[in-house]
Image: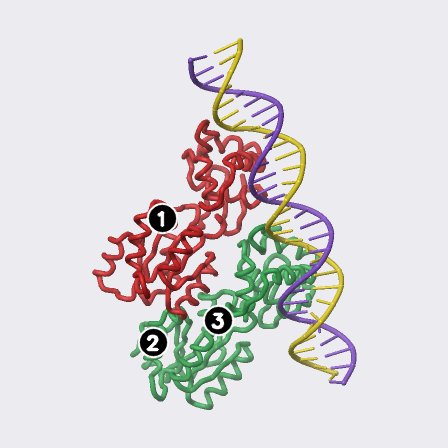
Chain colours: A green, B red, C yellow, D purple
DNA sequence: GACCCCTGTTACAGCTTGATGACAGGCCGG
DNA sequence: CCGGCCTGTCATCAAGCTGTAACAGGGGTC
């Protein structure tokens, strides 16, 4: 869940589909591709992605109408959307942002630029999904490389421990309840014991060694907290 | 109790229920969802929430009638209520406020906006639930981080001591009865000895050190008071 | 100054909460 | 197919927190 943002690509040209799938997976994102607005709706209904990448020109319902529709629904009101348009003047015409997209890119675009824009949008909406390196004190976490180090010393963490640390470091100095942490790790449709978080905190602390004890604080009666200054 | 505000969501559409539950829990609020006015009454009877989020259109008893009923009862007269309404026309809005809701939002709404309005209402009615940092003299209390400091010096308090201080600091220069304090800490359905508050005041004063003696004043025959200027 | 009411303080038993170690099952790679 | 990690749960233990009673002390009233 917290590991890689899910991107829904709505694009009908096969060549571009493949280009996007490849470059986005390298980013890394988890990529789901559909080729029409109708399929996009169906996919979104079954699981909300972290971001939608949407071609303006589509068979059937147009991209613009899809954005309008998504913006009119409570569930998808805040869903980050980036539009892809064929020509710059098109972007001008639709005023990309006016119809409710968060950003747009014009073809031809460089994957590098696209990914940068996606990160920018995610950064605004959900900081821990943006893929930025997080650095606090001697601790450094790189979400893309999925590495953690403390004073240049590499630290090995299991996937869940990594995601947990990532979320904690992205929300420093804030007491987080076990519920919030479980939601961040597993999404809101999974039912797990609150106490499971205790165990992961323990494993994470053990993995981080002495430094970990200082940075991950227990907030009695509430949950846990990542403290910036020990 | 005082740690996270309890929100009762009265909403019959499943999709909106889930959206609200997720975004409110991240806020963070403690969320209870019911799908009819009758269930809402039953829930409120068993435990008074900090705020009610109420869809105007419900099966059975309408949202409007529920508000009227709540406003007619002593126990729920002051309960903050935000109405959610599908129709955006002005008559509804005015009606919403006239019948006694504290605020309203119209669908479609963004979770961000909704949470901002909830905070605003809470800030007005129950300042200690709004989540703002409270700063009085050298004392500083951060509800999100759950930290207290005096002249930059961290102070460690037990959960109840923290909540008590939070409530006191949010209502400065005002004599508060033991009943009021117990209510704020434990809700209105828990019965405890008044004198228990004395003990918590004692523990809180001890925790705050010399500064605490000066700021928490005893109001003989009434209760206690947080004084701004020693 | 005596008395009563109120508050301060302490001690304590019971309970809740968090830390920890162990374990079964699942998944993955070799 | 096997072995090794990873995951989620549980039982247990230690520590901290809570609520009450009991006693001490002080202030105000008459």
The tally of labels here is: 3
Q: Is residue A200 left or right of residue B201?
A: right
Residue density around tag 2, few if under 14, some if 14–19, many if 20 or more, within 10 Å? few
Mark 2 lies on residue? A69
The subunit letter for the residue under badge 2 reads A
Mark 3 lies on residue? A119
CA–CA distance between discs 2 and 3? 24 Å
- The answer to whether residue A122 is visible is yes
The subunit letter for the residue under badge 3 reads A
Residue D17 higher or lower than A86, as above or below = above
Mark 1 lies on residue? B76
Q: Secondary structure at mark 3?
A: helix
Residue density around tag 1, few if under 14, some if 14–19, many if 20 or more, within 10 Å? some
Looking at the image, the residue that sits furthest to the bottom is A14
Q: Secondary structure at mark 1?
A: helix
Residue A109: image tag: none
Which badge, 2 or 3, comes first in the chain's sequence?
Answer: 2
- Which quarter of the figure has residue A175? bottom right
Residue at the (37%, 84%) spot, across then down: A86
């Amino acid at each position: 869940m917290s590991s890689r943002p899910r991107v829904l690509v709505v694009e009908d040209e096969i060549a571009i589909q493949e280009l996007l799938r490849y470059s986005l997976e390298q980013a890394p994102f988890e990529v789901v591709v559909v080729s029409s607005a109708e399929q996009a709706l169906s996919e979104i209904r079954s699981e909300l992605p972290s971001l939608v990448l949407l071609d303006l020109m589509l068979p059937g319902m147009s991209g613009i109408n899809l954005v309008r529709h998504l913006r009119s629904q409570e569930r998808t009101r805040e869903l980050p959307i980036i539009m892809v348009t064929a020509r710059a003047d098109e972007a001008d015409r639709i005023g990309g942002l006016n119809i409710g997209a968060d950003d747009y890119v014009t073809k031809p675009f460089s994957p590098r630029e696209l990914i940068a824009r996606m990160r920018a949008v995610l950064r605004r909406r959900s900081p821990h999904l943006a893929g930025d390196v997080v650095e606090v004190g001697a601790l450094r976490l790189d979400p893309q490389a999925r590495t953690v180090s403390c004073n240049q010393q590499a630290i090995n963490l299991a996937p869940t421990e990594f995601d947990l640390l990532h979320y904690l470091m992205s929300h420093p100095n804030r007491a987080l309840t076990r519920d919030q942490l479980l939601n961040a790790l597993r999404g809101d449709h999974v039912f797990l014991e609150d106490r499971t978080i205790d165990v992961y905190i323990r494993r994470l602390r053990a993995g981080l060694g002495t430094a970990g004890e200082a940075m991950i604080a227990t907030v009695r009666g509430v949950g846990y907290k990542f403290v910036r200054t020990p």
